[in-house]
Amino acid sequence: MPTTTGLADLNKNMLDSVYKKITLRMIPFLFICYLFNYLDRVNVGFAKLQMLGDLHMSETAYGLGAGIFFIGYVLCGVPSNLMLYKVGARRWLAWLMVAWGVLSTSLMFIHSANQFYLVRLLTGASEAGFFPGLVMYFSSWYPSDRRGRVMALFMSAIPLSGVLGGPFSGWILSHFANIPGSIAPWQWLFLLQGLPTVVLGIAMLFMLTDNVAAAKWLTEDERSLVQNTLIADEKTRPSTVSDSFVAVLGNPSIWILGLIYFCIQSGVYAIGFWLPSIIQASGIKDPGVIGWLSAIPYLAACIFMVLVGRSADKRRERRWHLSVPMLMEVGGLIIAANFASNPTVAILGLTLATAGVLTALPMFWPLTGGYLSAAALAGGLALINSMGQVAGFASPYFVGWIKDATSSTDVALYILACVMVFGVFLVLRIPARTVNR
């Protein structure tokens, strides 16, 4: 007869096997969806290299257009996630993908700054529920001690979108510039990177199931094992969790989490929207070369993100696994600002900053498990995410304004480094016992 230890090991092995099956079924497809989600959001950074001249737009106008996306995103974040809770993840996420895919593609037809603003605003509204919806979706499948790894694996789509999207975007801008009578290269960019999202949205209807109970591709015993694991995990939440969305609004800790996420996203979007321009300002002018060089920081982030996610789950430590990557971005931004005219050192600094801030993204979300119950999850995650996405408007617009005023992004990088230091201060004020799960 197996010992108690032997039974525990057997159950763990069975659970590992089931979660491997779940991960292989869901994560590759959702990874690709999120890759195009992030690519569609930030590809204006490459389009900007040519679009501004064609449309006679200033750097400030571009920054406003890049950032206005997040006004729609913030306004629609909470209602969109509440709709997902009512309609179901599969249908709602599929609809969102089709809608923003069509809107992102339609950027190829704009002829003025005002049209740019309008389409970006509507695209942000369409994308608002996608990421927080997926975070909530994962929480209905994975217990807290597995969520760090899966979030890191899933969110490595962000740096991979830079690894693949940078060279691809650079190639589009270079290749289609040599085709006479064609639409502009930046228009080709929006067309070729927007339409796949529509196809993926339709495919989602066939690839996802709304919850564990509906997953016919799992056996009955496998479904029971996962459901019992999730019930047991819910019981381990500390007494500080909020039990409803109304309680979330009155919990100051939730607002602190939103402020931390704002600090992180300030760095994410400054890099996402301005990385090609910063590389160009270092003296490199060829779009193809800029595309390849922009892939280097994202490739480093891909590797570092997965390694840190595994370490955080293995050690069940959350605060320092978030704080150290944030401090890496601080150092990287300072290096990039101090050596802006030296391409090699500037790219080294940008690599350090990108690897740090993109790793901070998946390391942040496990912190929320200490404050949100299942009942408050939909609204709470959307609220935190919406607060963070305010940075998506403020950060690009701020960088553009600084560049128009000073002809350089250096001052903006220093200020963003200070914002990140403040975020680290807030993280380290969170009690370790609340979030180290």
Image: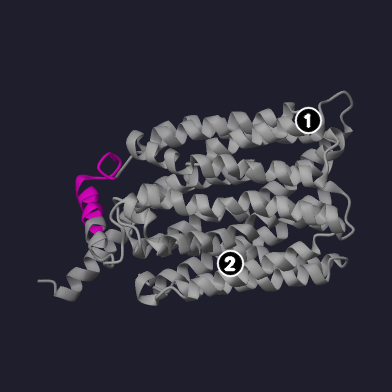
Which of 195/47 is in front?
A: 47
> How many numbered discs, if any?
2
Q: Secondary structure at mark 2?
A: helix
Q: Is residue 383 above or below residue 300?
A: above
Q: Residue at x 58, y 67 (%)?
A: 304
Point out residue 299 in the picture as x, y percentages from the top left corner.
65, 60
> Visible in this render: residue 168?
no
The image position of residue 286, as x and y in percent, is 87, 49
Q: Residues within 10 Å of mark 2 (few under 14, many from 20)?
A: some
- Residue 258 appearing in the image: yes
The residue at 26%/59% (across/down) is 234
Q: Nearer the viewer, residue 294 or 381?
A: 381
Left or right: residue 33 compared with residue 419: left
Q: Is residue 214 magenta?
A: yes
Image coords of residue 171 (percent x, y): 78, 42
Q: Amino acid at mark 1?
A: Ser
- SS class of the residue under badge 1? loop
Q: Earlier in the sequence, mark 2 or mark 1?
A: 1
Please report the bounds of the magenta region as a residue range: 212-229
Q: Residue furthest top?
A: 181
Label 1 packing within 10 angstroms: few (<14), some (14-19), many (20+)? few
Q: Is residue 386 magenta?
A: no
* Tag nearer the camera, 2 or 1: 1
Residue 268: percent from left, percent from top: 63, 57
The circle drawn on residue 112 is: 1
Q: Is residue 195 left or right of residue 375?
A: right
Tag on residue 262? none
The quadrant of the picture occupied by the N terminus is bottom left
Q: Quadrant of residue 435?
A: bottom left
Q: Could you tell whether 52 is left or right of 307 in the image?
A: right
What residue is pinned by disc 2?
Answer: 304
Q: Residue furthest left?
A: 1
